[in-house]
Image (cartoon, grey):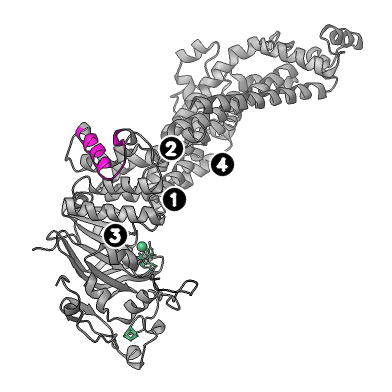
Amino acid sequence: MAAILEISDLVVDIRSGRSTVRAVDGISLTIEPGRTLGLVGESGCGKSTTGLAVLGLLPAGGKVTSGSIRIDGQDIVGLREAEARAIRGRTVGVVFQDPMTALNPTQRIGAQVAEPLLIHGMANRSSAMKQAVDLLGEVGLSRPAAQAQRFPHELSGGMRQRVMIALALICGPKLLVADEPTTALDVTTQDQILQLFDSLQQSRDMSILLITHDMGVVAGHTDEVAVMYAGRLAEHAATPRLFGGYRHRYTEALLESIPTLDTPRGQRLATIAGLPPNLGGQLAPCRFAPRCAHAAKVCFDAEPSWSEQHSHGYACHLPRRIDTDPITEIAGAPS
Amino acid sequence: MIGFLVRRLLQAVAVLFIVTIMVFILIHRLPGGPARAELGVQATPTAIASFNQQHGFDKGLWTQYWTWLAELVRGDLGYSFKENSTVSALLVDRLPKTALLAGVSVLVAVLFAIPLGVVQALRRNTIVDYMFTAVTFVLYSTPSFWLSLILVLVFSVNLGLLPAQAPQGSIGAVLSQPSGLVLPVATIALISVALYSRYMRSSTIDNLTQDYVRTARAKGAATSRILFGHVLRNAVSPVLTLLGLSLPFILSGTLITERVFNYPGMGLLFYNAAVTQDYPVLLAVTLIVAVATVVGSVFADICYALLDPRVRYAHA
Ligand SMILES: Nc1ncnc2c1ncn2[C@@H]1O[C@H](COP(=O)(O)OP(=O)(O)OP(=O)(O)O)[C@@H](O)[C@H]1O
Ligand code: SF4
Ligand SMILES: [Mg+2]
């Protein structure tokens, strides 16, 4: 099957003032139709920048320096603005982190959800409104016709995020970019929204790029995981395979920092010491080396190369050892 | 919305009440009190005594205040011996003309300022932006009498295109000679355009960087659609608020301009009253300006509520 999203060797530079930051430095990813890829990593490692590049919405000063982004076969890098607009909102939808600010405060939500249909000439006003109300019902708003007449501030955060999802899906996109879609919500609501993603994905057969820093979210709601660190990919595998047999020491550190049911109460959670590097400054050959508990001399001398087996790739000199091949250990793992 | 309106109006009435008390105190602080104010500095002590008795000025302060307020409410603002007319008759003649001048000027200023501010916001920190900023600020800081004289010099004296003197007589006469309004309106509008365009610029920039604009772009909306469909409405509300709040500034602008063009409005009336120490007129105009300030701020709030549903409902 042809991939819906195919990112090859993507490099994104963001210039602000005199300095330039290489926010994304040579990333390759693909998402097949109907599948969800989780993009994880700590704050500032370039997840959002990757997502915004896919939408053609890089911040001012941001630019794809090299590489390609193919959406449904079409390379969107270097498209003219009008051509990029035709894809945005129609082939690719997006849900942002903060539902409190992502909606226009002075417009009724029905009109906001219907707008993409009008922009892309896919419906007239009345049919667009009707579709918007139907979709609001589908994403879980009760009495959607009445809700469509309300303003964003009259809804709770969770409801607004549902509105945002409806807005992203109204044109039936093939790809949904969800950038920390649940980070701003309380835990119960987070769960409901993630389940909504799962069910919408099944009913609509769309691909999702799920950006998050939460390994727990990734575990339950993705088919594949890409771990990002300081603008680079650290590790990439099918979700069960990654959790069963992660190799990269950064992935290890990330996973050790999430609580499990076995974590004794009151025990302090391990967090990764230090902060991700400033991408504008000097970087160690393995970018994680200054913080890595396993770092050796080689990690400061040479850049680890990407090795890949059974669609499981990572870049680490001293990977975590695994005794059994997880592919035989985990039954039914997608290849 | 109704509840918000009622509350806001009650508030305004309370403020107006305080304003009347302050104006009343002003009258009593006048040299010689209201009698001299009305009768003039040459009035004899006997005349003053009988005036005070006749008008109840020998009674207690509160009684006097209530009497004065009751007269005020009936529209009795006193008598101007200098103009030989009741003050209310003077105001009825002059106020509409000033309202016309101020209203048209502000309208013109805002009609220029809104697109100007939007263009500056879209081209922010470019040469275009800097140029407009420079020009509007030079105008803003120009004294209005000087600007009006320059305009008269160029358009009346040199080019002979427009009259240097405003039309005289009733508001009908003023309206029938619109060319006479052009230069006074231009003076006030040119000076105040910077005030509004600056606001429009910063409020547009502020909105353009909001998340909801990013959402609109993610929908595939073109810049024009983002501007007219989303940003403009959100960006214009602070400007309308400013409009209401800038009313005193506009009225003081008309004062000078009316004097230069000999425009027969309230400003000219006030100017002449100041020169001849015609206190009843001065106080009445002060009262009117105070009322206009309060009305302006109510107008600002109502505009804001109409444009921004968050305000409308938060106060409902
Ligand atoms: N508008 C911008 N101007 C300058 N630098 C930026 C801008 N946006 C992002 N960056 C830089 O790009 C890098 C990646 O940022 P990005 O927002 O993609 O990270 P992220 O992984 O999404 O982090 P978070 O979890 O905090 O959202 C950061 O180092 C940041 O400093
Ligand atoms: S390459 Fe070395 S420093 Fe980098 S993650 Fe692996 S072990 Fe740690
Ligand atoms: Mg981010």
Q: Nearest the camera: A219 or B307?
A: A219
Horizontal relation, residue B86 to residue B133: left or right: right
Helix, strand or loop for the magenta stretch, by majority: helix
Closer to viewer: mark 2 or mark 3: 3
Tell me the amino acid under the disc marked 1: Tyr
Q: Is mark 3 within 8 Å of ligand 1?
A: yes
Mark 4 falls on what kind of element? loop
Tell me the amino acid under the disc marked 2: Val
- Magenta segment includes A142: yes
**Distance CA(mark 4)–CA(mark 1):** 16 Å
- Magenta segment includes B60: no
Residue topped by disc 4: B141
Tell me the amino acid under the disc marked 3: Leu
Query: Which is more N-terminal, label 2 or label 4?
Result: 4
Residue topped by disc 3: A52
**Distance CA(mark 4)–CA(mark 2):** 24 Å
Q: Chain of mark 2?
A: B
Q: Residues within 10 Å of mark 4 (few under 14, many from 20)?
A: few
- The answer to whether mark 4 and mark 1 are in CB contact below 8 A is no
**Distance CA(mark 3)–CA(mark 4):** 44 Å
**Distance CA(mark 2)–CA(mark 1):** 21 Å
Ligand 1 is in which quadrant of the figure? bottom left
